[in-house]
Image (tube, rainbow, N blue to C red):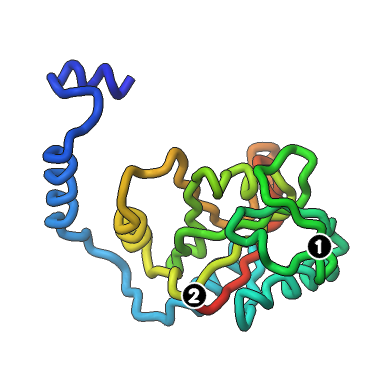
Amino acid sequence: MLARIRGRQGKPPNAEAAELACVRDHLAAHALSPAPRNDWDVLERFRDRAISLASTVDDALTIEDVPARVAAYLAERSLSTRAVCWREFASLDWGGNGIDMESRGATGDDLVGITGACCAIAETGTLVVLSGVDSPPSVSLLPETHVAIVRRSSVVRSMEDAWTRIRAIGGDLPRAVTFISGPSRTADIEQTVTLGAHGPYRVHVVLIPD
């Protein structure tokens, strides 16, 4: 459909470098709209907003401490210790902490999925997840429990800051940019909020240093 629109505009099927540069220049020159005050502490705001959305938040001293923190979270809630994760976390000592981990995309039988995040938005308590060969979106969408490992420096103030960060990565946008604001929920049936309707029942965030 987009290719047909470009064709009607007399443009080639794919944007050329000059067209992309023009768009980037326009975005860079565009003034931001007025925004609410955001002079709060970024990490504390993210933590408060995430918890208000029924997520849970934990802190790890180092990336190596993450498996132990995740194992404690799963044990406290009597959840499955079989999990799938993105490739970047496959080398952590999951087995030494009692977690049977596989690095692959998730299926409907997987109960725990562990991902990273491009960034997190403090203003809304939202995780921003980008799809890719080594970061399949199924890991955050199919399992009942989604655990996100988030670097503290990647917590940004607003949605506008999140898009700035995504664009700064360079290259084309990924096939999917997913915004996750707490567990999946709906109130379609008798206006009763139900968690896990279209995705995970639980979202657990582990904050780590850079």
Which image quarter: residue 204? bottom right
Seen as rendered, the residue at the extreme front is 91
Looking at this view, is 117 or 51 the one in front? 117
* Residue closest to the far right: 78
Q: Nearer the viewer, residue 60 or 120?
A: 60
Label 2, residues with CA under 10 Å away: few <14, some 14-19, many ≥20: some
Look at label 2 and name its amino acid.
Arg
Disc 2 to disc 1, how far (Cα)? 24 Å
Image vertical order of residue 189 relative to residue 74, above or below: above
Task: Single out the mark in the foreground, 2 or 1.
Answer: 1
Q: Position of residue 153 (x, y in %)?
A: 44, 74
At 64% across and 38% down in the image, what residue appears? 188
Is residue 55 toward the left or the right of residue 13 in the image? right
List the residue tagged with mark 1: 99
Q: x, y percentage for residue 9?
A: 14, 21
Indicate whether 86 appears above or below 59.
Answer: above
- Specify which label sits upstream in the sequence, 2 or 1: 1
- In the picture, the quarter occupied by the N terminus is top left
Q: Residue shown at 78%/49% (left/top)?
A: 111
Q: Is residue 115 above or below residue 133?
A: below
Q: Residue at x 18, y 41 (%)?
A: 20
Q: Amino acid at mark 1?
A: Ile
Going by the image, does 198 lie left or right of 167? right
Report whether residue 176 is seen.
yes
Residue 166 drawn above or below residue 52: above
Residue 191 visible in the shown view: no
Residue at 61% x, 54% y is 87
> What x and y, as percent, mark residue 63?
61, 74
Residue where numbered disc 2 is placed: 152
User: Pointer 1: residues within 10 angstroms few (<14), some, or many (20+)?
Assistant: some
